[in-house]
Image (cartoon, coloured by chain):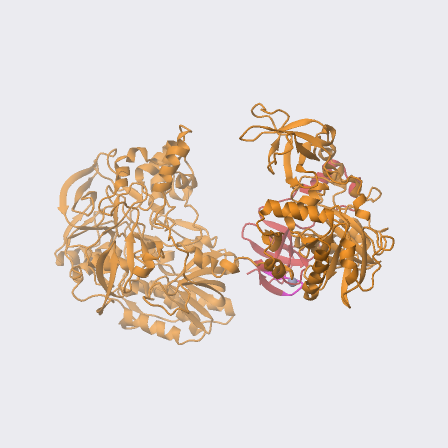
Amino acid sequence: MLLIHCPCCGVDRPEIEFRHGGEAHIARPADPSALDDHQWADFLYMRSNPKGVTAERWRHVHGCGRFFNALRDTVSDRFLAVYRTGEPRPDLDAASTGMEGGK
Amino acid sequence: MSQPHRTPATGRIDRSVPVTFTFDGRTLQGFAGDTLASALLANGIHLVGRSFKYHRPRGILTAGSEEPNALVGVAKSAAAAAAGQSVPNLRATQVEIHEGMVVVSQNRWPSLAFDICAVNDRLAPIFVAGFYYKTFMWPKSFWNSVYEPFIRSAAGLGKAPTAPDPDRYANRYAHCDVLVAGGGPAGLAAALAAARAGGRVIIADEQGEFGGSLLHETGATVDSKPATDWVASAVAELAGNARVTILPRTTVFGYFNQNFVALAERVTDHLAAPDPSLPRERLWQVRARQVVIATGAIERPLVFPENDRPGVMMAEAARIYAGRFGVLPGEEIVVATACDSAWVAALDIAEAGGKVAAIIDMRPDPGAALVARAREAGIRIETDCVVTGVLGKKRVKGVLIGRRKASGVVAAGEISCDCLLMSGGWTPNVSLHSQARGKLDWQPEKGAFLPGDPVQAQRSAGSCRGVDGLAAVLADGAAAGAQAVEAATGTPAPVPDFPATGGEAGSGWWLGTVPHDRNAARVRAFVDFQNDVTAKDVKLAVREGMHSIEHIKRYTTTGMATDQGRLSNMNALSIASSALDNQIPQVGLTTFRQPYTPVTFGTLAATSRGDLFDPVRRTPIHPWAAEKGAAFEDVALWKRAWYFPGPGEDMHKAVERECRIVRESVGIFDATTLGKIEVVGPDAAEFLERIYTNPWKKLGVGRLRYGLMLNEAGFIIDDGVVGRLAEDRFHVTTTTGGAPRVLALMEDYLQTEWPDLEVWLTSTTEQWAVVAVQGPKAREAIAPLVDDIDLSTDAMPHMSVREGHVMGGIPCRLFRMSFTGEAGYEINVPPSRARQVWEAVFANVERLGGCPYGTETMHVLRAEKGYIIVGQETDGTVTPDDVGMSWAIGKKKPDFVGKRSLARPDLVAEGRKQMVGLLTKDATTLLEEGAQVTVEAEPARRTPALGHVTSSYVSPAAGRPIALAMIANGRARMGETLHVPMPGGAIAVEVVSPVFVDPEGNRLNV
Ligand SMILES: [Zn+2]
């Protein structure tokens, strides 16, 4: 079971307190009607599913209830960073991310 | 009960405490400290089971949890056995005997000695690798009548208990700095090092006693003490440390992400009369900062013909039985080996009083020191020789010897014996490292895979990482423990020194088939004993195109036994590599998976059984409905009153009466389970505008509107009535099971897409109980109870909401709405007052000739009106237009969730399924929900169905069965005759409007 650091509560908690929310940084288009069918289908269905670092949404559903984003390595299942919704994807090459739960 | 095969004096058993148990009805005696295996061997019993596929007689092979053959059923007592309470498939090598234990062998009928299915053994040529895939394919008609019954009766290992499990299971969560898996020399050294540095330590060992190999390493010393004394002092030191948890009989069975480790503790199985307050087993879920894996190594069988006969045993296992349990596994013992450790075993057994007739070593030059000692002990020595076969079926009678020559193996006579010990060397036990996703490194000089760099916070120590020799293993364990505690706590930890003598490192190993001079077509050498996989099977799998080790495993079932292939994998891999003409590391091992050894369902379920399996939600009206004799149905977690049968009524009659009474006078219905969400804030209307298809901004305060919710793909996912209580406050209702999902979806959009909106969402499902009153006399039924709300249609028309009070001050939200087609109200009151209000309303309802009704009547009434139920008419691929609800879409809204998708080509294409009504032509047949609908009565094969029946009821109002269905182009087919093919013949149906009652809706406004 994963140990996940909630950036809102500031604590490490077991995975069962959280719900996975799919890939992060896929913003709903401001004006969906301006998208053609292909673009809209991309938004609806196309996800990156990388082998390696992925940015994904989590919700601390049995805690504070907040959504946040996390960088996780899909090979090692290791969390590399967590950050709040709306913040840009952290640059992993930059300094340490302050993760406690990612040991 | 003489236990004739005991050594004169050795062992850790207590010879002053005899223990009586039965095996297949025979009363036997062992001693306190015996495992079932050692006690059986003490009584000269080797034949303990039949194999899975060929039903070959099998004996005890090992002394540990990797035992493939000696699987037994165990009951605590004769009384428990008679009550059908037993545990199948326990390994006799792990079961600690206690007084009164009842043991049965498995996989045999009618008896262990004479087994009917042993005919399988002679049919072996048809039970080759992949026989499941080949044999049972044709003819197809044989499947139901022949193959499946045969497989079902022959398959499986032990027998499931016939009575419910009477035992209790517990669950604990724990945290620690260092978890040590394994309590042998490396594990104890690691735990001591970590504990002495102040770490919180958990040490677990699957056996009843800590010490591992030290318990039978009789000549060894540690810290200048005899090894077993050192074990005792180490355990005492750990036990005296409050920061250490010692868990004997506890298997570390699962290594999961981020050092989440699962342990199964067998608490009471070894006790004849345990304290009833104790659970049978306890599941430990440990989050460890660091893990030290000290799981040792497992001795590898040699793959020679007839290597599975009872009396063939692993050399180290026999050494354990002699040294630790005081049992000699045979009168005349022969040892077949490719490594030094079996020589040590032979010498120890001889010293314990056993007669070792010969040692047959595959190597030309075994170590001179060992040879000298064996000579001194009077043991015949044959080097550069192999065992080429075993005589005897239910017990070893002798062995065939072959001499290795450059030209091949030549026969070199036979030796009579009743026990053959074998050793192909040692396989480091890398299961947990592999479970922890650590890679394995191939060490060609050791013929072994060793743990590579760990991925998680763990390290392996001792012989599980190829360290050999007692002193080196202790040092490795101590270093690992110190490193682990330092990594966990950040405090430097000294490495304790545990000087040791004895237990010297050995050399030599063999992988794969042993060469022989026998007719290869006629002999079988077993690789996987439990699954009856032979060397030939592995080669055949390769010949038949299985080139990946994972495919070979599944095709042959090698390595799929309860030991996860710990005994068999390396030999299977070696044979497969040779057959593939490839190198072992290139072919690779199959993945080790959780659990390490089988774990009972009871342990995993712990307290989640019976009433505690799932939460049950009951409304405040539930006790009243139960008192009235209601039948209940499960809807999500809720218990809902299904119907209220009167005297002599079945469900059909009760529902017919309830439906009629609601339409004629009035019915009372518990709608408490509807999900409720309070949506509040200056942007509440804007938020709902975006979430629902409907327009909300112009909805007046005090008005209700039916809301339809889509997902972004344009499909209906929920619906419900929404009331506007104030400019900035809405009372949203959802489907009964849908509230958590809808609230989560709303939160998602609010938090992540539109954080600028000032809206707050609160679940209020539990805050309001809902008394629904429906029917032409609904107003009459509630009017006397309402304090301060004008109920006249002018003041409170259909689809409106008022806040006020009932019954002298009970606050309420009163909805005027209908899910029946009749005029009606839903009285929302605090749950604490719900029963009081319900009973008062019910008194009025009863006085007016009304009745309570349940969910079945609710379903019939709504179907008569063509109202959909999300999840019944819809299935996640249905749009508003498909169910005729384009009217619910706010046409002028620029956007809402799902709007863009409604313009996708496939959602506007011709031929989509549309909701229609169906009437059976004979006006009497009730269609089956889910039945397919076709144009032809007898459609040609592969004709796609037009659609399917979604709802079907006998309608009292229509006086006949009615149905709703989703039919391709349904709305253009009004009046057409279609067919519902059923096993008894097709049923002709007419396509009609889905509204069967009061299409104009006049009854809503009375
Ligand atoms: Zn949180």
User: Of B525 and B825, which appears nearest the observer?
Assistant: B825
User: Could you say which chain is coloured orange in the image?
Assistant: B
Q: Residue at x 43, y 54 (%)?
A: B595
Q: Is residue B769 visible?
A: no
Residue B967: x and y in percent read 67, 32
Q: Quadrant of residue B409?
A: top left
Q: Is residue B891 above or below residue A21?
A: above
Q: Quadrant of residue B345?
A: bottom left
Q: Is residue B364 left or right of residue B187?
A: left
Q: The magenta stretch spans which residues? A: A4-10
The structure residue drawn at horizontal position 41% and vertical position 36%, both measured from the top left corner, is B547
* Screen quadrant of the N terminus of chain B: bottom left
- Place of residue B364 in the rendered image (x, y in percent of width and height, measured from the top left): 21, 47
Q: Give the chain coloured red.
A: A
Q: Answer above or below: position of B330 versus B192.
A: above
Q: Position of residue B14 (x, y in %)?
A: 23, 69
Count the marks: how many?
0
